[in-house]
Amino acid sequence: MSEPEDERSGRARGMARRQVLGVGGALGLVAFTGLTTARALARRPASTGAELRSEVPLPPPFQVPLPLPPVLKPVSATGGIDRYEMTQRATTAEILPGVKTPLWTYEGTFPGPTIEARRGRPVTVTHRNKLPVPAVVHLHGGRTPAASDGYPTDLILPDGWPDAARRAQGGHGGHGGHAMSGMHDPRAVVTRLTRDYTFPMDQRSALLWYHDHRMDFTAPAIWRGLAGLQIVRDDDEDALGLPAGRRELPLMITDRAFAADGTLTYPALDPDLREQPGVQEPYLAGVLGDVILVNGAPWPVHEVDAARYRLRVLNASNARHYELEAVTGDGRRLDLVQIGADQGLLAAPVTHPRLPIAPAERYDVVIDFSDVPVGGRVTLVNRLGSGRTRDVMAFRVARKAADDSRVPRVLANDLPAWRRSDAARVRDISFRAGRMHGGHGWLIDGKPFDPARTDVTTRLGDVEIWRLVADVHHPVHLHLVGFRVLSRGGRPPLAHDAGLKDTVSLRPGESVEIITRFDGYRGRYLFHCHNAEHEDMGMMANLEII
């Protein structure tokens, strides 16, 4: 489809962020998704986006050992606070065997190092930015004061970033805006080289993750490697007897694509990620890769005992959805026993034959390998994938072993019991594609993100019900708070909606009710779609807690 002349000339001059999304005339939802109906999308949620194809030979599956992210050691642990230092820097790593791939990393690894935290013991992380572009860090799932939440314009500038650009992207003393979008954010707090992030850790034990959250460039920054795990533990969880130690495995699942020279392929309009945000036209609905990585390794394999294992699963993909299933070599399906959600342990276990997981969701599951013969293999399959994206990883049962772990019938009794009658208000919020600034983008309640505009204001301590509605698949994330899913399409929640969540997968045309209490801290927070391309292209909104 051809573009109008004014849009072609505007693109040549370098349009503002929102105009970059304009691809002309009658481009609509069909072109965004590559599918013709919401019903088709419901059958193929992984297709909310377009897939890149790698140009290098890809390794066979289940040959590369599963790497485990290193655990970061604190530089000090005095005064009841664990203090860490982390440098964001470019490096080169061997992701595909024999192929060197440039990455942007935390501490030189992808994923970044894991931070092990204890409930009630504060953590401070000093981030140093040695990347060629500004950076922001968000602890996803953290109950964090606004100053450390990683607001998209609270930038850490690298050495040598021009002063003019600094003023345009945040300014000195909190005065400034954003050069690419032409937006002014008087509340932005910009630092140069380093920034301290303080996390009180006054929250339930849970798997959290940290990632870049820079305005307009979150998607390509995560794609290049800026993501890592933070685990919160507490005494109550330790006492349950769940699989632990080497039988507890963090699994960060991502998809990527590789160019002929080994670099990560990403369809950015500005490959340097400095001035012009956005992706090429076919990928406006999301970027999918054809290589599935787990902890940064392609289709890895992990040796296990014939025993129970606890899998801490994160979907850190930009746009790809998965439906996970564990299948033995003789075709049997092993149960996935869910014990936790985004915000920690469930009240009681929930058993799944398959488990859908949207971008940014986390699931804590136990899988029992005790009935698999030694030498047998269990494959973790993605039932939403096709071709090479159908496989995720494999487990090879290496030995019989004693196992004194258990999965108690009662896991937690501290989940909030909010009721509908507790709600101070009910809000209807829509997540849809739409027109903005003469082009197309992704909108919340018909508006693209503007850091200078407050979209929702609520009072500290208020309980609210939000009714969320989607056109295509949108994994919706709320900062600061966890929530419970009350209903889907007017019906009870699905089995995988159990527990306390911070990200919920909206399906095409679906309305989902959630309930939460806005407690913790006052200040400016966000809610947004965690399809990272949607987020960068406008699907984010401000939440002010007063």
Image (cartoon, grey):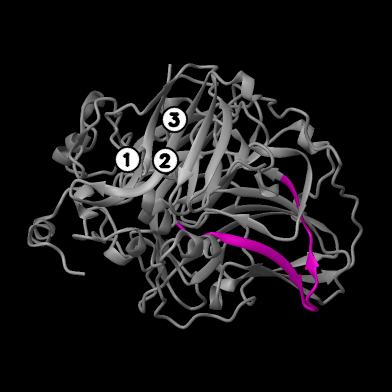
Residue 181: name its quadrant. top left
Q: CA distance from mark 1 to mark 2?
A: 8 Å
| Mark 2 or 3, closer to the camera | 2
Q: Secondary structure at mark 1?
A: loop
SS assignment for the magenta stretch, majority: strand
CA neighbours of label 1 inside 10 A, class few (<14), some (14 to 19), many (20+): some
Q: Are marks 2 and 3 in contact (CB under 8 Å)?
A: no
Q: Position of residue 397 (x, y in %)?
A: 80, 70
Q: Say which residue label 1 marks.
A: 446
Q: CA distance from mark 1 to mark 3?
A: 29 Å
Q: Of callouts 1 and 2, which one flags the residue occurring earlier in the amino acid sequence?
A: 2
**Res 218 visible:** no
Q: Say which residue label 3 marks.
A: 148
Image quarter in which the C terminus is found: top left
Front in this rendered view, residue 409 or 159: 409
Q: Secondary structure at mark 2?
A: strand
Front in this rendered view, residue 454 or 370: 454
Is residue 335 one of those drawn in magenta? yes
- Bounds of the magenta span? 319-339
Q: Of callouts 2 and 3, which one flags the residue occurring earlier in the amino acid sequence?
A: 3
On residue 369, which mark appears? none
Q: Are marks 1 and 2 in contact (CB under 8 Å)?
A: yes
Q: CA distance from mark 2 to mark 3?
A: 28 Å
| Mark 1 or 3, closer to the camera | 1
Image quarter in which the N terminus is found: bottom left
Q: Say which residue label 2 marks.
A: 430
Residue 410: name its quadrant. top right
CA neighbours of label 3 inside 10 A, class few (<14), some (14 to 19), many (20+): many
